[in-house]
Image (cartoon, helix red, strand yellow):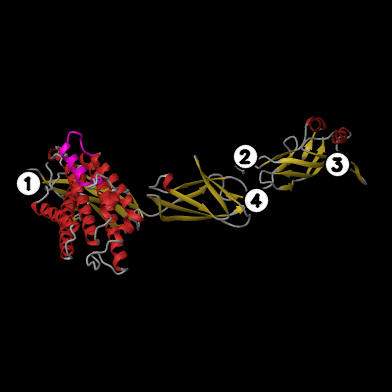
Amino acid sequence: MGSIGSPETPRQKMIMLMYLVLTAMLALNVDKKVLDAFALVNQGFMSTIQNFTNKNQSVYAQFSKAALENQVKAGELNRKVTRIKQHSDSIYNYIAKLKKMIVERADGPDGSVDDIKLKEDLNASAELMIAMNNGKRLKESIDLYRDSLLTIFNPRDSAQIASIKKSLDTTAPLSPEGIRPTWENSKFEGYPLIAVITLMSKMQSDIRNSESDAINYLYSQISAKDFKFNKLKAQVIPKSSYILQGETYEAKVFISAIDTTAVPEIIVNESKLSINPGENEGTYSVVTSKEGVFPVKGFINYKSPGSNVVRYPFEEKYEVVKPSATVSPTKMNVLYSSLPNPVSISVPGFSSKDILVDMTNGRIEKTADGFLAYPEKVGVNAIITVKVTSENKVVKTIASTSFRVKRVPNPTAKVAGKSGDDISKSDLMAELGVFAEMGDDFDFDLKFNILSFDVSNPSVGGYESKASTTGARFSQQQKDIFKGLSKGSRVIIENIIAKGPDGFTRTLNKIVFKII
């Protein structure tokens, strides 16, 4: 596929020749009619620029189309020409801004590049472009742009390379005295305002001309044969086939391989889809209103290389269900304060990564095995709310479930596995201390530490002996009380203080044994 641009036209050559002649006449101090002639030359440059812009835009459109039709073959080239366009527009607009600044410096804030009053002004351009260093910055920008364009050419393409270098040359010419001034001095010092503006329009024309050379060179690297396919298949890609009632089912319907010149016709459930801008595909969407399984079927009409229309049928389905969520603690039907309460949460049709959960009166965190709820205030209900996400956005609140929050119940204080009743003296003497055990109906595996307790031996008329200890083990003084017990006597273990995993201390049950 060859270049779709065009070489320099005779009209463009004529404009360039007029510019050179007028510049020479200015050097001879020809009257102001020459200044008006420069304005005409400037208009000619602007007309040429518009022609280049239109032609370049056509090439960009062809690249976009080629990239859409075959991303593998044309995608990288399209990205490359997009960068060229951005760079070209940037330096073109920069020159336009400088032109405006120069004219306004001469004619005032209301000055217009299209209607210059002081065409003969010799100071504005020199002050702005030389004294204020804008000319130096412009040269650097042109150099950078030129070097960037040259990187796309094969070294063997000497003609294109030479053309770019000539159009964007920033070498200052030698003066009659054999002195080479700076580029900015050679362009902006000693020339009337209209001549400088015309020169800068020529720079803009050179930018568009070089842009055209570069993108046409890249376009010539795309071959029409790259876009021939031998296998076509109609496809439907839904965002999800499992839809909540009231939500929207959405699917992309397209042909998996396309021709460069053909745009498909897509029919879904007897309705024609609009083709998405810049894509050879349509988007089918329908708001769901009831539960059930629904079909998505139709066909894609596609024009073959021989201009025959080929039909590719397809058929899919999606399921609509009512929003629901299961939220239940895995241990009990309440949540216990200050404990990690395991909670099972599931939403039919959604994976765990698409489920968001939050909780009032505490916090809830996700683990590898589910969720752990940490309620705080006893007596205040904790509400667990479940939401689902799609493409990292919250799309719906599925359910909110309220749970009572209770304090962890007291364990039962025991000795020898008993909380009272009859015990032999030898069994009591064999025990090490007091232990706290949760009831069989409490599923959490909790450990309470015994902090202190009292042992006493009551007798008629009062207490015969009493001993206290810290910790869970019997003290020697308490064991001595056990030694003095006789058959039928009683021993009382009371004031049992224990501390649980929730950090609270509590007084446990009294243990009363009768010696047998």
- Give me the C-alpha separation between circle 3 and circle 4: 31 Å
Q: Residues within 10 Å of mark 4 (few under 14, many from 20)?
A: some
Label 4 sits on residue: 407
Q: State which mark lies toward you, 4 or 1.
A: 1
Identify the mark nearer the N-term, 3 or 1: 1
Amino acid type at image mark 3: Ser
Write down the quadrant of residue 482 in the picture.
Answer: top right
Q: State which mark lies toward you, 3 or 1.
A: 1
Quadrant where the image shows the N terminus: top left
Amino acid type at image mark 1: Ser
Visible in this render: residue 297? no
Residues in magenta?
152-173
- Give me the C-alpha separation between circle 4 and circle 2: 15 Å
Judge whether 513 appears above or below 379 on screen: above
Label 2 sits on residue: 445
Q: Which mark is residue 456?
A: 3
Label 1 sits on residue: 307
SS label for mark 2: loop
- Give me the C-alpha separation between circle 3 and circle 2: 32 Å
Residue 171 painted magenta? yes
Closer-to-camera residue (218/512): 218
Q: Position of residue 81 (x, y in %)?
A: 23, 45
Q: Where is residue 328 in the image (x, y as percent from the top left)?
A: 51, 49
Identify the mark nearer the N-term, 3 or 2: 2
- Give the left or right position of residue 412, taking residue 372 as reference: right
Visible in this render: residue 433? yes
Q: How crowded is mark 2: few (under 14 residues within 10 Å), some or many (20 or more)?
A: few
